[in-house]
Amino acid sequence: MPADVVAVDDGGAEAVAEAVGRLARLRAEGRSGEAHVLLAEAARWPAGRLPLLADALHRAGLGADWVTLLWEAAALPAEQLVATAGTLTAAGRDDDGRQLLRQGVARPAEQIGAAVLRLDGEGREREARALLDAYVRVRTPEEAARCVAADPGRLVPLLLRAALGVSDERHWDLVHALRVAGHTA
């Protein structure tokens, strides 16, 4: 397991069971606002608990609440977002990990660029690649090109490598968008 992926927190089973029970009660009582608050709080739990929570919510017939929780988790700081997505993927929840990344890259281009620089600077290349991969898959080439503004010398090669991993067409579209934006590609 990569160093940046958190192991599933089997010790969190009690907290998961308590949260699912409380959520089921809130839903049964029609207290949707409080249920949403609980989901927003759970989205910020340690990443290792989320695979357990996903399984428990689905077993309890609360799968729609898992989708809401993923939406809330997409607002996590980019570094935590990528680690959480990696943890979900490592726990066999590949679709959830990809969905979380797709939703998380809706943030402004400048934030994506800054997060990639931090991750790369900390030696967390796998996380930086995962974030850029999701970004170039979801955003237009013109939008993706905007994320390099903070440090084109470091970000352009990383972004182009991510685009090449998507397709040759995406790579050439991004090369063009970068050139139009005034960056050497």
Image (spheres, grey):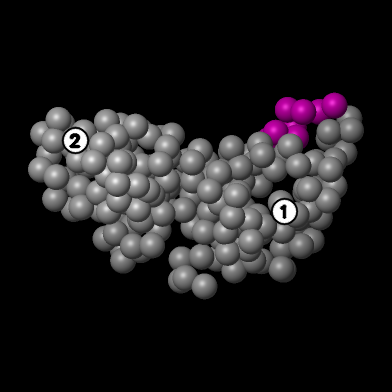
Pick the quarter of the image with the C terminus.
Answer: top left
Specify the quadrant of the image occupied by residue 99.
Answer: top right
Decide which of 167, 122 is in the foreground and name it.
Answer: 167
Give whichever of discs 2 and 1 has the lower sequence position: 1
Viewer can see residue 89:
yes
Query: Which residue position holds label 1?
Result: 53
The picture places residue 1, in percent across and down from the top left corner, at: 52, 73
Secondary structure mostly seen in the magenta stretch:
helix
Q: Name the kind of residue labelled 2 in the image.
A: His
Task: Identify which residue is drawn at 40% across, 41% down.
Answer: 137
Q: Which residues are magenta?
A: 30-38
In the picture, measured across the screen, residue 77 lies left or right of residue 156, that is: right
Task: Identify which residue is drawn at 60% across, 49% down.
Answer: 96
Query: Which residue position holds label 2?
Result: 176
Q: Which mark is residue 34?
A: none
The picture places residue 145, in percent across and down from the top left corner, at: 24, 37
The picture places residue 161, in percent across and down from the top left corner, at: 27, 53
Q: Is residue 182 above or below residue 128?
A: above
